Amino acid sequence: MGTLNIQSIRNKYLMLEQLLHEKEIDILCITETFLNTNCMNYNFLNHDFFRSDRLNKTGGGVAILVNRKLKAKSVCLNFQFTNIECIHVRIQLNHLPCINTICLYRPPNYSSSAINNDMKDLKKLILSLDSNRMNFMLGDFNMRTNALQDNLNSLLDKHNYQQVVKIPTRKESILDLIIASKLANIFNISTWETHFSDHMLVLGDYEYQYTKPKPEFEFRRNYRNIDYYQFGLDVLKIPEKIFTTCEEQFQYIVSNLLNIFDTYAPLKKVKIRPNSEKFYISDESKTLRKQNQIAYSQFKRNIISKAELRFVNKSFKQSIFS
């Protein structure tokens, strides 16, 4: 995984393809692509290319390259940034929960109002992400001063994120960052010079600290195939005894009943699945559900009216929630 400010991808497509192959990069976030709606979409040999172009202005633009062995899809954010350019891609890692990868470019605007707006937008972005997933934010943040970096790190610490790049990425400044949620273990951070950008290529390895929950079990009885007639006869065969206290008599009856249950419906150890509780539906509701399905089929064939379909559907819902 890595990030690079490429300063125009237009004439560097082949060099970027070679870089992906040489460094064996699965996920690469690119800033300042300089693409617009008139530019073609690039087809990489082993990577899917997700892009978000700057609108109505030259320069800027962000993109994410994801190796095709990983399943990836673009995700729309539910809010807009004031200054920051952003693209969000969700990536599936085999059987593990998916990870959120966000490429960001913050234009080098250092006015107090712009910085305040950018910090507010970054907070909105962090709060919009699922804290139970592994989240990455990569890109050129243009945090040139120590004060800006301290403000960013303070925001990240409050929400259990960490900025892991400690090496200058352009001259003496740490501009290109990798930010990760605490669920992610980032290591082997390195920077590499490229002959086609004055920013360093920043790379890091990641490890998903995902602990599969231990399965839970409980003991259950299956009452479906009980012969209740024979069960009742066995209950009547329980010998009568006289006890001095009601508690002793109660315990005697319960122990005999449990013995009969163990014969007809023995306890079995069952693995509890998440959300395994089923909503109980009575026989009447099952009949109405079937009628509802038939009514919908008849409505599609213009046999009954929409009002009749609504009446059947309403009856079915009332039977469930009553």
Image (cartoon, helix red, strand yellow):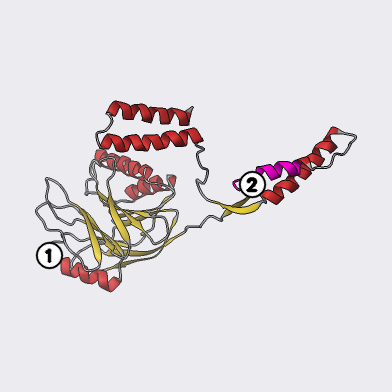
Kindly identify which residue carries mark 2: 226
Structural distance between the alpha carbons of marks 1 and 2: 76 Å
Q: Is residue 90 left or right of residue 55?
A: right
Q: Earlier in the sequence, mark 1 or mark 2?
A: 1
How many residues crowd mark 2 within 10 Å: few (<14), some (14–19), many (20+)? few
287 shown above or below 202: above
- Give x and y (percent) for residue 56: 11, 45
Q: Which residue is rendered at x = 32% and y = 27% of the image?
A: 308
Q: Which of label 1 and label 2 is nearer to you?
A: 2
Residue at 28% in and 54% down:
73
Tell me: 277 left or right of 226: left
**Range shown magenta:** 222-235
Q: Residue at x 39, y 49 (%)?
A: 153
Q: Specify the label residue 11 is tagged with.
A: 1
Q: Which amino acid, by three-letter code, is at mark 1?
A: Asn
Whether residue 23 is visible here, answered yes or no, is yes
Q: Secondary structure at mark 2?
A: loop
Q: Quadrant of residue 139?
A: bottom left
Looking at the picture, tell me which residue is in the foreground, 260 or 90.
Answer: 260
Examine the rendering and report whether any part of residue 174 can be seen. no
Closer to the camera, 67 or 147? 67
Secondary structure category for the residue under label 1? loop
Q: Residue at x 14, y 55 (%)?
A: 35
Q: Residue furthest right?
A: 244
Residue 226 counted in the magenta span: yes
Q: Amino acid at mark 2?
A: Ile
Was residue 14 drawn as part of the magenta stretch in this picture? no
The percent position of residue 101, horizontal first and vertical second, equals 32, 54
